[in-house]
Image (spheres, rainbow, N blue to C red):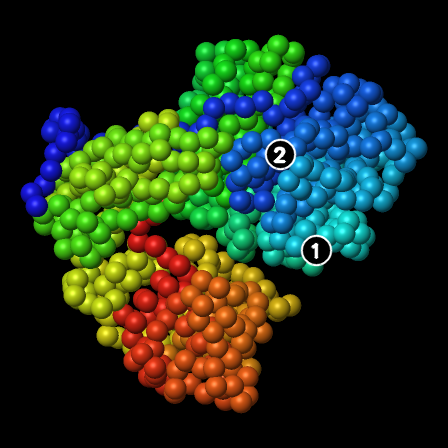
Amino acid sequence: MAPRFRGATAAWLLALGAIPGAAILAQAPPLGGEFEVNTYTTGSQRSSAVASRGDGSFVVVWQSDGQDGSRNGVFGQLFDRVGAKAGPEFQVNTYTTGNQGNASVAVAPNGDFVVVWATFVPAADGSPNDHVFGQRFHATVGGATKAGTEFQVNTGTSGQQIAPSVGMDASGNFVVAWLDSNSYQYELFGQRFDASGAKVGAAFPINASTTKSLGRPRVAENAAGQFVVVWHGYGAGGSYGVFGQRFSAAGAKVGTEIPINTFTSGGDRYPAVAMDSKGNFVVAWNGANQDGSGSGVIAQRFNAGGEKVGGELLVNTYTTDDQEQATVALDASGGFLVSWTSVGQDGSLFGVFGQRFDRRGVRIGGEFPINTYKTQRQSSPAAASDGVGFVVTWDSYFEDGSTYSVFGRRQILHPERLTVDAQGVGTSDLNGVLEPGDAAVVVPTWSNNAVGAVALTGTVGSLDGPAGPVYQLLDGLADYGSLGSGFVGDCNDGNPNPCYAVQISGSRPATHWDATMEEDLSSGGSQLWTLHLGDSFADVPRSQPFYKKIETLLHNGITTGCNATQYCPSTVVSRDAMAIFIAKGIAGLGELVPSTGLVGASAYSCTSGGHSLFADVSPTDAFCKHVHYLAAQNVTLGCDATHYCPAQTVTRDAMASFIAKAVVAPGGGAAVPVSYTDPTTSRSYSCISGSANLHFSDVSVSNAFCKHIHYLWAKGILDGCTPTTYCPTAPVARDAMAKFIANGFGLQLYGP
């Protein structure tokens, strides 16, 4: 079939041809309209905090003036997966005398959540100063119900305990950090709790210096219970700035206090932090004198070892006057949203703006306004990743007619996946990879997380990439029809020409070549899709059985090849190279593999003059940090008690063991089940003595790798060398390893 053109496509082609290499300016994600969070509107409702269990639902808490009968109290509202209010607004605090405010909230995957706040004079325990209290909740269909009674977080009651922040792990255990001031001495403390609300150990100090001014702390905790606390003030060396401290799941300090900011203006303050499941984290804060005009918003990425990844990011592009009150939310892919308050930018006093970044810290389009009501003040944003996008709440002045109220917006459409070259228009070979010269169909898939149906169409706003090649848009319109609430759909409805079509031709500008396609949606917002170009390696033709898997590793930053133009697919893999591939797979990016850390209680440092835990791995070896990271993740203990055997060839059974333990990391071999039935594939096995429930005839229950091999088979990650045999002792070449890695970590060549 010849390449097709619809509507104004020819005009788009001319326009695109006129601006080769033009920057893509994707703006906001597809956000729904503003919604008012609070139901009670008398007086002021402000200072919100938001958290999500990761399935689209979320909870917002705030302080409300006079609603509990005595000055400020803390209130909350649950929202379901499509953003509808779940149950009525609820009161958090039981003790109501005086002020209760500065609330923070954290949610577990099962929906249980905890709220902490500061109770001001007079305090609930009878002492004359301010203290931190908390309340646990269960989330039900009908709304929130209290779990147990209100509890005091801090144990010591002299001085003031204020500005609390809370994080929660996947099991519902939580940690609270707060600022303690006593006789002009400032210190940050933390307290861990189990899922029942019982204290775990005593309160512990967070910062190293206690002699000078400190600002309020912020804590982020991941599913495994690791957490990081950030704050501003004077550090251990006497310098002023933003600092952080990492902690293990057991509450022990990991490493020393971290200076967060690199640019030291003396005005860096009010940090926010978000952490992912692997322990990587992002910090955003207010930086003075750095954007050329007053205060600006700065961000810095860190890997799980507390090492800076890249340089500081100046988040805001509009720099007139002040941009401040930064907050940050991190999604499951490692991408993040920074939101902040900007003075005068939206034509009124204050407005809330946002900027998205991908997992590499690369800006996605430009900054965008979040609030749509722009009269007077919209400020003090809070943000969370809700599993389908981001939700942001803020204070808005007089929007509901009664001083301050809490409003929010959330992403209502979520990009699910991208299918490329499954249908052709002329020169395509339909191999699922867009190659130079292909005229290929591009099919996005979206889910609707709004309360009602959305009639959705899309338009390509821009198709671009590195300078030199020609980027042709053959079809720039897509029709998704009506997406019902909670439904997932694509533009391939069986009708002629329902989706986009592109053709990209010319000389390859780099081994890893990506184009970008901006899709503008009729509902509002846009998505920047990445289109990887195949034929990357001269020695990996399209007919190579593992061609697409090798392209997938390149695109995901797992490999750059064995040299500038080749992958060396038939080269047998050694344990050092395997460590690099698998460590990158676990961490997500090579730069996120830390060079220092702990294996159990033993410290390692893969730096010049550092210390290796393996006698045959030097601290300066290129693979040192990867080997030790795998050991820290319980993927390997070495080939014996003191050696790793980096040059040893990897066989298929050993590869299965590494991948299986990487999939369940950091649970180690014990987390790989001896018997298992996969709920998705329905494949089952049992590696228990005497069992006949084994798929591979050459892998017996006595094989040390029986459960690892069959676990990966049951999950659909690997197949055998024949339909019924695995060939466990055969060596693994680099091409086959690409399939192990891509399947094991669920890597995609195309997608959001």
Residue 9 position in % (x across, y down): 15, 30
Which residue is at 42% across, 41% downward?
487
Which residue is at 64% across, 68% downward?
601
Question: In the image, which disc is placed on residue 86?
Answer: 2
- Callout 1 secondary element: loop
Label 1 crowd (10 A; few <14 / some 14-19 / many >=20):
some
Kind of residue indicated by mark 2: Ala
Residue 574 position in % (x across, y down): 36, 76
Left/right placement of residue 417 relative to residue 486 reads left
Foreground residue among 555 and 322: 555
Question: In the image, which disc is placed on residue 251?
Answer: 1
- Callout 2 secondary element: loop
> Residue 92 is drawn in which quadrant?
top right
Left/right placement of residue 524 relative to residue 306 reads left
Which residue is at 20% across, 57% downward?
431
Quadrant location, the C terminus: top left
